[in-house]
């Protein structure tokens, strides 16, 4: 059995593989790590289409893509996400590098985006910065359907404006994107968690209320009641919910500026026909949120129904050592989005193979390979066999791979200069000169140049 072991000695990693099983002479296969998974074709074509749509929609709103490293210094998340959050306390993949630096596989990307914004002085460019990202995140959560330890997020951030119109535009863009990928049934939940000054007064009243209530709550909440009372509202423990329901609500403690900001957000959502529900308990799991917070849930997802989380984080840049810069963003759980897209049946994974080339006999191999190359250069997905085989077997391959067309080249076709192009769904067959085949297929497949 393969059993990798870390050899002792500072800074030295060698892997010792145990001897093979002498009886069967086979080694035990290595499986993917718990909570991680392989994404395979044809499903990956759906992932690509969702990502293509994200690139399109975000570009229309004038966002540029940012790609930050997956590894960051642990301090970034401790400072940026908050030491009292579940993410930082229980879920991060943190390790000491060989030079003793503490590194973490990013559990989310907003802190990284803001770090990059500060590191590259993007605030000097002037105006607001609109950035989006797509990529894997890591949290050591209990795996189940829709919850993984390596999962993917598609997110966007706007830095440099406090204007509530920006909050609404972010939500509008999100809703447009969801519609484009076929998600029509969902709920948009919104709330305001105020700013640091109105939150201080609220936290005081929450603390007082919790002094009486905490005894009946879970151990985590008993601790949070003293260390970070806002986190109590995030508690998922069923038995705590009736107690949480009776706690004071932040929405009743907003100062006049925060109240006005929230009213502008909700009235503008209404004006744009974007349906929402004000949810006073929505505080979200990360410490950096201020004012607008929102979540999108989908009934198609079962227990893990949160599809998108987002909100404003006006103090984050300062917390990370940057200039005072307001910000707002969201993050879509791509794994869950794909599950919801599959459930909506509007877009399905599809097999993109346009043609399978069937060639018969050695003299047809070179022209067949030439056609394969030409069609691929035209952007058509094409496959053939490299070893010679009987026509029946080659047509069987075309069937198995669900090719839309089979193109048959025998010696007769070589002599006439016209190849047989067979539509595999209708069995309709045409004889075409090789130079016209790409256009013919594009027309039939409705692919625009
Ligand atoms: P958050 O960064 O916690 O605000 O999460 C934003 C979105 O990411 C959530 O609404 C989920 O759709 C998704 N998400 C968060 N954690 C996981 C996970 N462990 N597995 C899959 N998706 C997740």
Image (cartoon, rainbow, N blue to C red):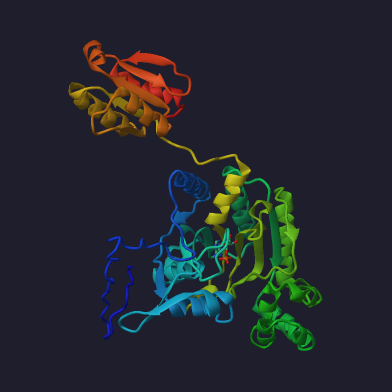
Q: Residue furthest top?
A: 416
Q: Residue furthest front?
A: 23
Compared with 118, 278 (above or below) is above
Compared with 118, 345 (above or below) is above
| Residue 94 visible in the picture | yes
User: The C terminus appears in which quarter of the rendering?
Assistant: top left
Would you say 242 lies left or right of 421 here? Answer: right
Find residue 110 and report its horizontal and vertical position in percent: 51, 67
Residue, x 69% and y 78% (percent of image)? 232
Would you say 134 lies left or right of 170 here? Answer: left
Residue, x 29% and y 16% (percent of image)? 433
Q: Nearer the viewer, residue 115 or 386?
A: 386
Quadrant holding ligand 1?
Answer: bottom right
Find residue 340 and report its horizontal and vertical position in percent: 60, 49
Residue, x 34% and y 13% (percent of image)? 431
| Residue 319 visible in the picture | no
Residue, x 37% and y 22% (percent of image)? 439
Q: Nearer the viewer, residue 318 or 285?
A: 285
Q: Residue furthest left?
A: 363
The answer to which quarter of the image holds residue 41 is top left
The answer to which quarter of the image holds residue 427 is top left
Q: Nearer the viewer, residue 390 or 160?
A: 390
Q: Nearer the viewer, residue 363 or 322?
A: 363
User: The N terminus appears in which quarter of the rendering?
Assistant: bottom left
Find residue 217 and report its horizontal and vertical position in percent: 74, 82
Find residue 114 and report its horizontal and vertical position in percent: 48, 69
Would you say 304 lies left or right of 116 here? Answer: right
Compared with 155, 419 (above or below) is above
The number of numbered discs placed on residues in the rendered structure image is: 0
């Amino acid at each position: 059995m393969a059993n990798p072991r870390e050899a002792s000695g500072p800074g030295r990693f060698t892997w010792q593989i145990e001897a093979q099983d002498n009886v069967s002479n086979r080694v035990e296969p290595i499986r993917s790590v718990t909570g991680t998974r392989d994404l395979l074709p044809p499903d990956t074509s759906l992932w690509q289409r969702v990502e293509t749509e994200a690139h399109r929609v975000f570009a229309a709103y004038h966002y540029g893509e940012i790609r930050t490293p997956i590894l960051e210094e642990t301090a970034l998340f401790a400072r940026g996400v908050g030491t009292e959050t579940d993410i930082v306390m229980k879920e991060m993949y943190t390790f000491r590098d060989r030079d003793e630096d503490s590194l973490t596989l990013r559990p989310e990307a907003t802190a990284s985006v803001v770090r990059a914004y500060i590191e590259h002085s993007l605030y000097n460019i002037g105006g607001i910065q609109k950035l989006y990202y797509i990529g894997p995140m890591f949290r050591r959560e209990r795996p189940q359907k829709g919850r993984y330890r390596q999962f993917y997020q598609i997110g966007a951030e706007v830095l440099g404006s406090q204007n509530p119109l920006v909050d609404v535009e972010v939500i509008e863009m999100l809703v447009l994107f969801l519609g484009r990928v076929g998600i029509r049934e969902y709920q948009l939940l919104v709330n305001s968690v105020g700013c640091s000054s109105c939150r201080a007064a609220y936290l005081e009243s929450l603390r007082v209320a919790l002094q009486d209530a905490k005894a009946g709550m879970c151990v985590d909440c008993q601790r949070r009641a003293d260390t970070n009372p806002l986190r109590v509202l995030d508690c998922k423990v069923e038995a705590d919910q009736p107690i949480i329901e009776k706690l004071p609500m932040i929405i009743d403690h907003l100062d006049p500026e925060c109240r006005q900001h929230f009213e502008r957000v909700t009235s503008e959502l209404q004006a744009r026909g974007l349906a929402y529900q004000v949810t006073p308990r929505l505080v979200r799991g990360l410490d950096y949120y201020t004012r607008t917070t929102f979540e999108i849930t989908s009934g198609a997802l079962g227990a893990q129904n949160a599809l998108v989380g987002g909100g404003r984080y006006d103090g984050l840049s300062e917390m990370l050592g940057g200039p005072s810069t307001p910000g707002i963003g969201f993050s879509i759980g791509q794994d869950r989005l794909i599950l919801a897209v599959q459930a909506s049946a509007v877009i399905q994974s599809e097999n993109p193979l346009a043609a399978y080339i069937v060639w018969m006999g050695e003299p047809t191999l070179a022209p067949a390979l030439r056609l394969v190359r030409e069609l691929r250069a035209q952007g058509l997905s094409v496959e053939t066999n490299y070893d010679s085989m009987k026509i029946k077997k080659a047509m069987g391959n075309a069937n198995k791979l669900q090719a839309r067309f089979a193109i048959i080249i025998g010696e007769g076709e070589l002599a006439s200069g016209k190849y047989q192009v067979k539509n595999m769904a209708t069995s309709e067959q045409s004889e075409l000169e090789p130079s016209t085949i790409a256009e013919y297929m594009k027309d039939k497949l409705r692919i625009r140049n």
